[in-house]
Image (tube, rainbow, N blue to C red):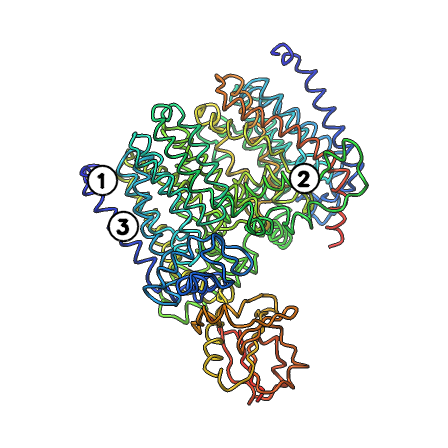
Amino acid sequence: MKSYFNKIPFFLITITVIGVLLRIYTLYFLRIDNINLAPPFFLELINKTQVLPPAVIYISSLANLLIIFWLGQKLFGSRVGILAAFLYSSSPWIIYADISGSIYIFLLLWLLSFFVGIVSVQASKWYIGMFLILISTAFLLYDSLLMLFVLPALFLSIYPYLNKNLFRSKFFIMSLVIILLPLFLAMLKNLTGVKNILNNEVSLFSNVGLLNAVNQFRGETDQTNLAVVAKLAENRYLYFTKHAILNFLKNFAPVVYFTSEFKLLNFSFSPPILFGFIIPFFWGLRKSLNLLKRTKFLLLIIPALLIPSTVSKSAPDLLRLIIVSPVIFYAIALGFEHYDQTPKTPALRVLFTSAVLLVILQSLVTVVDISLREPVRFMQILGK
Amino acid sequence: MSKLLESRMTLILVLLIITLLGGILRLTYLDKNPVSLSVDEASIGYNAYSILKTGKDEYGNFLPLSFKSLGDYKPPLYTYLVAVSEGVFGLNEFSVRLPSAIIGTFSIFLSGLLLLLLFGEKRYAVVGSLLVAISAWHIHISRLGWEYMTGTSLVVAGAFSLLKMLGGKWYWSVTAALALVLSMYAYHAQRLFVPLFILSFLILYRNQLIKIKKQVLIFLVLCAILVTPLFLSVLLGPDKTRAQMTFITKDVDFHRYVAVSPAYQPVGISAFFGSEYLLLFFYWARKLLAYFQPSFLFSNGLLLTVTGSYGLGVLYLFQVPLLIAGLVALFKKHITHRKLIISWMLLGLLPASLTINEQHYGRSFIIFPALIAIVTLGTVYLWDVISKLKVFYRSAIVVIFTGLIIWNLIEAVLIYSIHFPRQKGEDFMEGTKQSVQYALTLKDQYQDIIFDPVRGIDGPFIVNAPHIYVLFYSQYDPAAYLKIPKRIEGESYGFDKFTIRKIDWVKDQYKEHTLFVGSPWSFPLNSLSQEKILKKIYLSNGKLALVIVAND
């Protein structure tokens, strides 16, 4: 078995072909192509409405697959890399995002490149690392306003583990300033535009229903003799803090990723990741607690990657969560890897066998469903 | 704390004090909050009254094992407990809710004992029972005159006895069988959960059970004997109607959004993989996992406030880190009964996830003991971690956390005492009691009293069952009710002077010597003569709920 995994190019090509075929199949039955295409932040800022060409999204997705493999291989070994890449290429989540032209596929490419840069710097491949960090920072910030929050948070979360020479390098700092200068100038020139885009992207607090509810609560308590206590416990700042915390927590619910509770593109019954993978996912998580030295890095970056979905009005936002998808794929792959390495009790054997059977069953159900009922569901949503 | 709890008597004393505190939270204003008796509570109340007076339910069935009630075939145990309560306190709101509140209070103590057995240290018992005592989920369920609390508390008693049975004493086999099988007579969800729970217990503890074969045999034989009447009732009686009514296959969302008409007629293998049954399986998986959503767990799982706002979840927000720590500890530490807790959690969600509703705080209440065990584990684990920190950090964490707890508890008090009655009065048919009592005072002056069963502030969407409130609040003699002829025509139901049917004012305005009780949607209030309107009944939030109109 192990000898097969040494044939990495063979596996990568097979995974890519499977991914391409699944995308063509989905596209044939579902006319969801390019429905999510949007202009990058910088273009919006200078009042241009050009969207990213679909080809860019497809190429980014292919590059993502390769980088997910490469990073997985570097961090946890080739088998984890291959499995994670396979999960990326075959999960309905990524397939739907690719076809619909989600910019988050493109952003994921640069986030992954950013991490490749970090890994290279840590491995003392100084120039390539610095180049990758610079170029990915530039692409991320020019493409999405939200990355202005994500990137600093990412830097902060991995700062203790970073090679500090990076920030002592005048070349790095100067290049960063030069690259980002046009963006900041454009932002200064069009502050109203920035505000509008910010309001669109950060819609966490624009929930009118919640605001009305807070007012209703206050109105009700004002009629009682507990009005003073209510002022302390029921003010809008506390409610909005609670709202933000809950929005953040929602992203951690397994139901988001392994079922269709939050419909892909608002209509689909296909789960972002097949339900059966939940068992290796939890097994991987459990094991990653014992492997903190190797997995700490991955666990630390999660909160930063969840910012875009958290600030969305409709959190959890599956498209925005795409940037966290590799972490989940690695966890699942780690689960399989550790299952293979640990002594198997009968219970564990049953659990993993059912997981695999479930995955096979749901793959077939999903493939048939894409042709059979997904077009009808899509039409239903269009009709609305 | 460990030193303080060294003696068994001290532990029992501490648990009793916590139970007393919990009792106050469960028994205070029991008849006033929830603001009114729900239809189910009123039905349980009158059927219990009927059992008390005649030995028969409202349909004349002698000591039934399943109460037809409002056509939903309620499990019997709680109704019989209410009959006892009504024997002492009479037919009123307090009597209907009292058994649940008392059992809820007692289960605080019992949960402490169970946690002591599960984790083997007294501090777990104290922390756990305190968490149960202040739990909004537990308090709310305790204050409802429904079956959930009885069913779950009996499972707690059963699990405690099962673990004790491992010690080899035969009488624990008897209590385990009694408690677990009785829980199946208490609530529907237990009928699926308990057999699976027993099975998982037998598998998980097989090595220990093999040494106490006699006790296991006593337990199994007793279970089989006790469950037989219920088994026959479910198999041969009408109980299965209830299961059919609420089973997941009837889920509206599934048919509307998932099992839509296919784009083409599948044949061969695609007909198999495209079948609705396979989709239903994955739809069920989604419903199961949905119980772990933060919105259910921490924000509005108890449905005490209007949709879209924040209310109370089944856990408090301050319990987020405790739950996470509990899960980490559960897998990281050596916990003897870990597999039992996990299987309790997963099997407990099975009945709730197989039914039609979205996350249902009542049907899923069976997982409460397992969930609280995890949170308790997390609390003790976190405390151990924090106590190793430097004094400054430890103090800072304790101060912040205490602040969070105080905020959450104040918020819970405000929601339960102020917002819940105002925002959810209609769900508990607020106003029906006043309307019935008012109509009863005028009973002798009119030939007919007509109640419209449909009401609602936003539209006539809520179906009420006024006849059960009439029976309840008039304390109608059950023997007389069984004998009196009933008038059933189409959707109209009548007895004595009372008729339950939709009010059609175009025709009914000419009906003389009649009293009408309906919602504002039943009458043309703007054109109606003010003299005819005898009374307007408002909800706690000030909105008009019911109108009483007289045609002399």
In the figure, B396 relative to A342: above or below?
A: below
Helix or strand or loop: what does disc 1 sit on?
A: loop
Identify the residue under disc 1.
B1
The dot on residue B65 is: none
The chain under label 3 reads B
The amino acid beneath tag 2 is: Tyr
Identify the residue under disc 2.
B277
Identify the residue under disc 3.
B18
From the top left corner, tell me how far across and down residue B243 is, in percent. 57, 48
Between circles 1 and 3, the one closer to the viewer is 3
Between circles 3 and 2, the one closer to the viewer is 2
Q: CA distance from mark 3 to mark 2?
A: 48 Å
Q: Compare marks 1 and 3 and give the one earlier in the sequence.
A: 1
The amino acid beneath tag 3 is: Ile
From the top left corner, tell me how far across and down residue B147 is, in percent. 44, 53
| Same-chain status of marks 1 and 2 | yes
* Mark 1 burial class by Cα count in 10 Å: few <14, some 14-19, many 20+: few
Q: Quadrant of the N terminus of chain B?
A: top left
The chain under label 2 reads B
Give me the residue at 55% from left, 27% from top.
A280
Q: Horizontal placement of A325 versus A344: left or right?
A: right
| Same-chain status of marks 1 and 3 | yes
Q: Compare marks 1 and 2 and give the one earlier in the sequence.
A: 1
Q: Quadrant of the C terminus of chain B?
A: bottom right
Q: Quadrant of residue B20?
A: bottom left
The chain under label 1 reads B
